Image: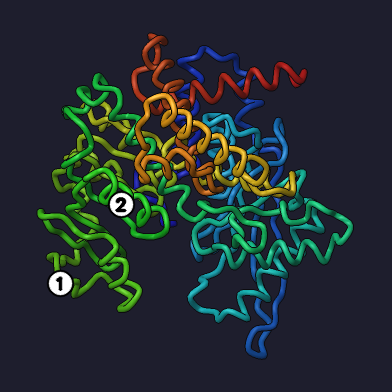
Amino acid sequence: MTQISNEPSFRESVELMVDKAMTAMNLDAGTAQAIKSCNAVLQVQFPVKIRGKIEIFTGWRATHSTHRLPSKGGIRYAPYANQNEVEALAALMTYKCAIVDVPFGGSKGALVIDPNLYDRDELELITRRFTLELVRKGFLSPSTNVPAPDVGTGQREMAWIADTYKHLHPEDINYVACVTGKPVHHGGIQGRIEATGRGVQYAIREFFRHSEDVKKARMSGSLDGKTCIIQGLGNVGYHAAKFLSEEDGVKITAVIERDGVLISDDGIHIEDLFQHILEHGSIKNFPSARFDENGIAALEKECDILIPAALESQITLENAARINAKLIVEAANGPVTYGADEILNKKGTIIIPDAYANAGGVTVSYFEWIRNISHIRFGRMQKRHDELRGHNIASMVEEITGKTVSETLRNSITQGAEELDLVRSGLDDTMRLSYQQIRNTLENDENVHDLRTACYVTSISKIARSYLDIGVF
């Protein structure tokens, strides 16, 4: 992405935020450097014949940490991708995994490409060639380095990667675990597509369970009726907005996209808008809201909750002082720069940081990886047993009381958990417990004054303990 004047790069912002946490911890310089260092970075350049001409593609895979294996992180396809960004995202993955107690190291990958310029067959050819480079160099396998979808990639690309790895390593019975975010019928897991957006919802729900935290954000009560602005209606933004509005009563008053912003103080129906975008390729001419071409200015619109779910460096030194949200939830990676973060903290704006808020994706990726390694879907062994136990409980209640249990209640008691139920339950539990750990750090460490620093202190403490346990230092 374009470097913003007078601001650190995305990588520098991540490092500055980590340094702030390490200073608060009084972590010695050697330990700090060991944790911050990127273990390895692979750059590849490979030719692919497209429409009769040879094109050279450049890609990277960065492995930030291997204190836990495999290292985990997405692969993005973007024309603005660069090595610094990849290394920053790999570092962020290390801290993110530690925050939510997912036993992975941090990794990230990228290919410099605009996917919109190529058709399906061409993208498949490019993806398979990129996979070949990663596998040959030891940067992709179920046991050491596992990619996932990111900007510009999805289930389709992950299926191509898994199939390519299978053909290169036909003896590996765990081949399907070499990537996560696959289609369900190719070894994926239910709930993975929605996972990051669902995790954002669960993070906000947990925040609102703590009335003291809500009060610090100059709000009160529950989520119901709170106003929210979403930037970016991609996979993460769409699911977060949909779940918050349909299940929690949040009113989406603005949706910011590449071509502008839709504004409606009465609330925007997210599913209707999503279908409009699928049909027309734009948010323009959506009948239930006012359109304005100046989308970035809508970040400054007054609201209770602002969810930047697009790209890095959207709230900067230039506009931070004019942000009127009471709570910012970073669904994207690095949407708030280091300088903007300091301005917002001084204003009293509460920020739920990216390293925690968007960790739903890697959490459910972990569930998928476990499912692939164990070669059994969740719930298969116990579902019917749980249903039978529910029937017995309902029958016991009827026998003791002499009254008939209603059909609705009986069905709710006797229904065994599906895989999706278990995935959502595991994600909800993860987001709840992780926030409570972060909150505990904020409350009990006198050197920590905001959730982001608390987040990194919590994460770095776990990583340092892990390094110490295995004798790295």
Answer with left or right where residue 368 lies relative to residue 208. right
Q: Position of residue 240 (x, y in %)?
A: 35, 49
Identify residue for label 2: 241
Q: Position of residue 355 (x, y in %)?
A: 47, 36
Q: Residue visible at 42% across and 41% down?
A: 410
Q: Quadrant of residue 121?
A: bottom right
Which residue is nearer to you in this view: 190 or 115? 190
**Does residue 28 appear in this view?**
yes
Residue furthest to the front in view is 402
Which residue is nearer to you in this view: 231 or 414? 414
Q: Residue visible at 65% across and 65% down?
A: 159
**Does residue 8 appear in this view?**
no
Q: Residue visible at 32% across and 33% down?
A: 351
Quadrant of the image containing the N terminus? bottom left
Quadrant of the image containing the C terminus? top right
Q: Earlier in the sequence, mark 1 or mark 2?
A: 2
Could you classify mark 2 by the number of other residues whose Cα lies within 10 Å: few (under 14), some (14-19), or many (20 or more)?
many
**Residue 98 in the image: above or below residue 122:** above
Q: Position of residue 219 (x, y in %)?
A: 17, 29
Answer with left or right where residue 330 lies relative to residue 462. left
Identify residue for label 1: 287
Amino acid residing under circle 2: Ala
